[in-house]
Image (cartoon, rainbow, N blue to C red):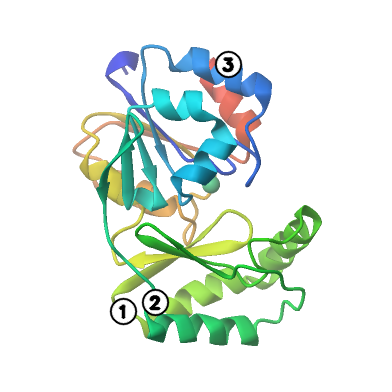
């Protein structure tokens, strides 16, 4: 693969950073160097503000495009160049509140429903939970798969919507097909993708599925990493 013709596409949470945390300072230095003369894209469920908080403005400004809200808000050189409108209606709101009340996870904090550009983020524990509680929820959810089950319910009750598990404590909801895979409509040529939720139901899965489906049309490499250190090791070899 000719490196400078290759499009490098990165998820952020769990791939370039620890979940919801700032990027490791040494990895950031490495990454900024590594980016030189490469075509780099970001794709994340987070909004612009959260992403800049996590990876810093230097990386964000230097990528070719940053696909926020799973590609439902697209930034180029710091400017919003495309967005889709999707807002919470009463029916979905009441459905999510029901899920919240029915949740067997008892320890709850604020901000369960977060409206972002083109996407709704839903968390039963709540986005304002302390770090320790976040960890506990993540482990609990691994066992009881609450988020997976809520995603399935959303899709069953709202056939025009799609939901996926992302990060550690929440799910993303958006119009059907408006998942991370839509960024591949705009990226022409070979793709090297790095993501931590490539399994079915994960928010990177649509990208993986789409690349595999279109395998006749382009070269690609999927790097399903477990953390940023693994990403770092892989990038050292490129
Ligand atoms: Mg991720």
- Residue sitting at x 47%, y 40%: 11
Q: Identify the image quadrant of the N terminus.
A: top left
Relative image position of residue 110 (x, y in whole percent): 66, 69
Q: Which residue is mark 2?
A: 155
Does the CB distance between marks 3 and 1 fall below 8 Å? no
Q: Label 2, label 1: how many angstroms apart (C-alpha)?
A: 5 Å
Residue 99, above or below 231: below
Residue depicted at x 22% and y 29%? 189
Q: Which mark is residue 30?
A: 3
Horizontally, residue 15 falls left or right of residue 108, namely left
At label 2, counting other C-alpha atoms closer than 10 Å, the crowd grade (few under 14, some 14-19, many 20 or more) is some
Asked if 2 appears above or below 152 in the picture, the reply is: above
The residue singled out by tag 1 in the image is 159
Of the numbered discs 3 and 1, the one sitting upstream in the chain is 3
For image coordinates 59% across by 24% down, the residue present is: 232
> x, y (%) of residue 37?
36, 12
From the viewer's perspective, tell me whether residue 20 is left or right of residue 186: right
Tell me, for residue 183, which label it has, or none.
Answer: none
Task: Indicate the position of residue 75 as horizontal and vertical percent values.
Answer: 33, 38
Camera-near label (2 vs 3) is 3
* Circles 2 and 1: CB atoms closer than 8 Å: yes
Residue 178 in view, yes or no: yes
Q: Is residue 202 left or right of residue 88?
A: right
Q: Secondary structure at mark 2?
A: helix
Residue 212 showing in the rendered view = no
Q: In this rendered view, identify the residue nearer to me: 89 or 157.
A: 89
- Would residue 80 be found to the left or right of residue 31 on screen? left
């Amino acid at each position: 693969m000719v490196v400078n013709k290759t499009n490098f596409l990165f998820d952020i949470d769990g791939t370039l950073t620890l979940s919801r945390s700032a990027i490791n300072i040494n990895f950031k230095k490495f990454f900024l160097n590594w980016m030189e003369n490469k075509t780099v894209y970001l794709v994340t469920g987070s909004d612009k503000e959260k992403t800049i908080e996590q990876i810093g403005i230097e990386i964000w400004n230097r990528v070719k495009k940053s696909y926020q809200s799973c590609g439902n808000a697209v930034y180029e050189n710091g400017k919003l160049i495309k967005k889709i409108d999707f807002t919470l209606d009463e029916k979905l709101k009441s459905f999510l509140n029901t899920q919240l009340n029915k949740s067997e996870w008892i320890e709850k904090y604020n901000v369960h429903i977060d409206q972002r550009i083109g996407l709704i983020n839903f968390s039963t524990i709540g986005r304002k939970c302390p770090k320790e509680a976040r960890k506990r929820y993540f482990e609990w959810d691994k066992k009881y798969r609450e988020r997976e089950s809520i995603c399935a319910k959303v899709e069953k009750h709202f056939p025009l919507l799609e939901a996926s598990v992302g990060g550690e404590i929440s799910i993303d909801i958006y119009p059907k097909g408006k998942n991370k895979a839509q960024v591949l409509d705009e990226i022409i040529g070979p793709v090297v993708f790095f993501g931590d939720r490539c399994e079915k139901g994960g928010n990177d899965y649509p990208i993986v599925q789409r690349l595999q489906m279109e395998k006749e049309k382009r070269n690609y490499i999927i790097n399903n990493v477990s953390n940023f250190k693994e990403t770092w090791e892989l990038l050292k070899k490129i």
